[in-house]
Image: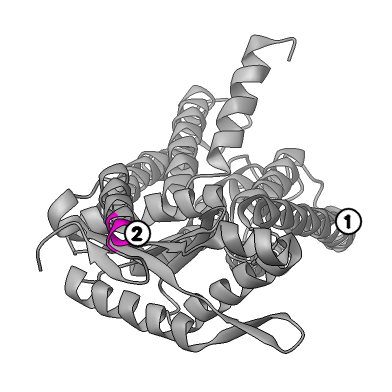
């Protein structure tokens, strides 16, 4: 980008797209706090203007400092629940209602039809659609619009003066005030609904496209398992979680015995069938929470979250026997029984370091190869 400031803003926003929901919400609250400070000083500056409703402004001069304090509390509360994933969605849903409603002082103060309100409203919704799941955005939107329409009804029926920060009928003449509010709200609703829907469709299409690209970049085309990149990314996240909870996690490395001979004797097409067969057998004998991927060539890697090395060895043995007992047809009327070596390691011995965990499993796998193949080995004494 040509301008450094725009380049910096672009960098920050792109980074925000990858933040978790709580961190995104905390950033929004920081911005809301900054906005509250600006509005407060504007309120103080124009409090004694000839057109200002000075008495009311004095009475509510605590409003934005109060919002600033509450925002600060909510930011700190976000840090408190950072390691409590089950609380994240409730935190975000609350903020989806709280944040826009905390800005309602503006339309009440400067008028429902003020251009600034429309810009802020559309800015909040369009930005939220980029940062949050749709149901979170629409949950907050429904509540906000309901409150906004309630304010309009109260104003039209005379229960609430228009633009309370000013003296009565300063901005709109008494004879046309209600008509302008009704027609403006009607046309604004139609325009906003059309714009938000169009933007939402575009964002959803962009997300699906990105998700497809991401899936393709992390999936092994032949077996449908994770590829090396996908395995590394997911296992790295799982290891972080295991480190936080201090729960033992195990890793299994799998290498198909004599795979080069299979390729040489039967051809690469049959070799591909063998790889698919092994992938299916391994997948069928694992839990939904386990992570499995093709690491390269004839090697597979399996992560067993929150599993002891003893149980991991049992899982490896089940997989080994399942492979040994299930044949794949490599030629017409010729069945081939696949055998493999399994190497097992655990965080109980290597610590919560993926590299160390992988190296120990790899050593155990090669130990199995040296000891005659078709067996399970661990680098540690059980």
Instruction: Give the residue furthest to the front.
Output: 265
Dominant SS of magenta comes to helix
Whole-percent x, y for residue 4 in the image: 64, 10
Protein image colouring: one colour
Whole-percent x, y for residue 23 in the image: 42, 46
Q: Does the magenta stretch include residue 198?
A: no
Would you name the residue on which mark 1 appears?
191
**Magenta-tinted stretch:** 367-371
x 47%, y 80%: residue: 323
Q: Can residue 233 be seen in this view?
A: yes
x 42%, y 63%: residue: 254
Query: 47 or 237, which lies in front?
Result: 237
Query: 131 or 101, which lies in front?
Result: 131
The disc label shown at residue 369, or none: 2
Quadrant (top left, top right, bottom left, bottom right) of the N terminus: top right
Quadrant (top left, top right, bottom left, bottom right) of the C terminus: bottom left
Q: Which of marks 2 and 1 is nearer the N terminus?
A: 1
Please tell me whether mark 2 sits on a helix, a strand or a loop: helix
Whole-percent x, y for residue 58 in the image: 41, 38
x 36%, y 58%: residue: 238
Quadrant position of residue 17:
top right
Quadrant position of residue 278:
bottom right
Residue 353 vertical position relative to residue 21 in the rendered view, above or below = above
């Amino acid at each position: 980008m040509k301008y450094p400031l725009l380049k910096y803003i672009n960098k920050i926003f792109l980074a925000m797209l990858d933040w978790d929901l709580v961190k995104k919400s905390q950033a929004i609250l920081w911005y809301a706090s900054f906005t509250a400070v600006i509005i407060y000083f504007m309120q103080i500056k124009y409090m004694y203007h000839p057109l200002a409703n000075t008495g009311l402004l004095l009475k509510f001069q605590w409003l934005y400092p109060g919002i600033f304090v509450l925002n600060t509390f909510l930011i700190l509360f976000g840090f408190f629940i950072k390691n409590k994933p089950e609380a994240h969605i409730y935190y975000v849903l609350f903020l989806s209602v709280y944040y826009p409603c905390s800005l309602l002082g503006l339309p009440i103060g400067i008028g429902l039809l003020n251009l600034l309100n429309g810009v802020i409203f559309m800015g909040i919704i369009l930005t939220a659609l980029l940062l949050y799941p749709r149901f979170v955005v629409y949950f907050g939107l429904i509540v906000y619009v309901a409150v906004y329409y309630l304010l309009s009804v109260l104003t039209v029926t005379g229960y609430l003066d228009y633009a309370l920060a000013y003296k009565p009928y300063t901005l709109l003449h008494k004879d046309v005030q209600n008509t302008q509010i009704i027609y403006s709200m009607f046309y604004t609703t139609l325009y906003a609904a059309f714009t938000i829907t169009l933007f939402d469709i575009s964002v959803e299409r962009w997300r699906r496209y990105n998700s497809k690209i991401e899936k393709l970049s992390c999936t092994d085309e032949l077996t449908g398992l994770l590829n090396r990149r996908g395995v590394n990314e997911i296992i790295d996240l799982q290891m972080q979680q295991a480190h936080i909870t201090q729960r033992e996690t195990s890793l299994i490395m799998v290498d198909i015995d004599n795979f080069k001979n299979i390729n040489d004797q039967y051809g690469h097409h049959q070799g591909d069938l063998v790889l698919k067969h092994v992938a299916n057998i391994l997948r069928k004998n694992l839990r939904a929470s386990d992570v499995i991927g093709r690491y390269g060539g004839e090697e597979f890697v399996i992560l067993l979250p929150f599993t002891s090395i003893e149980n991991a060895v049992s899982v490896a043995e089940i997989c080994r026997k399942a492979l040994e007992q299930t044949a794949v047809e490599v030629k017409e009327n010729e069945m081939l029984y696949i055998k493999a070596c399994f190497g097992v390691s655990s965080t109980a011995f290597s610590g919560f370091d993926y590299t160390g965990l992988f190296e120990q499993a790899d050593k155990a796998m090669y130990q199995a190869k040296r000891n005659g193949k078709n067996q399970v080995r661990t680098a540690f004494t059980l």
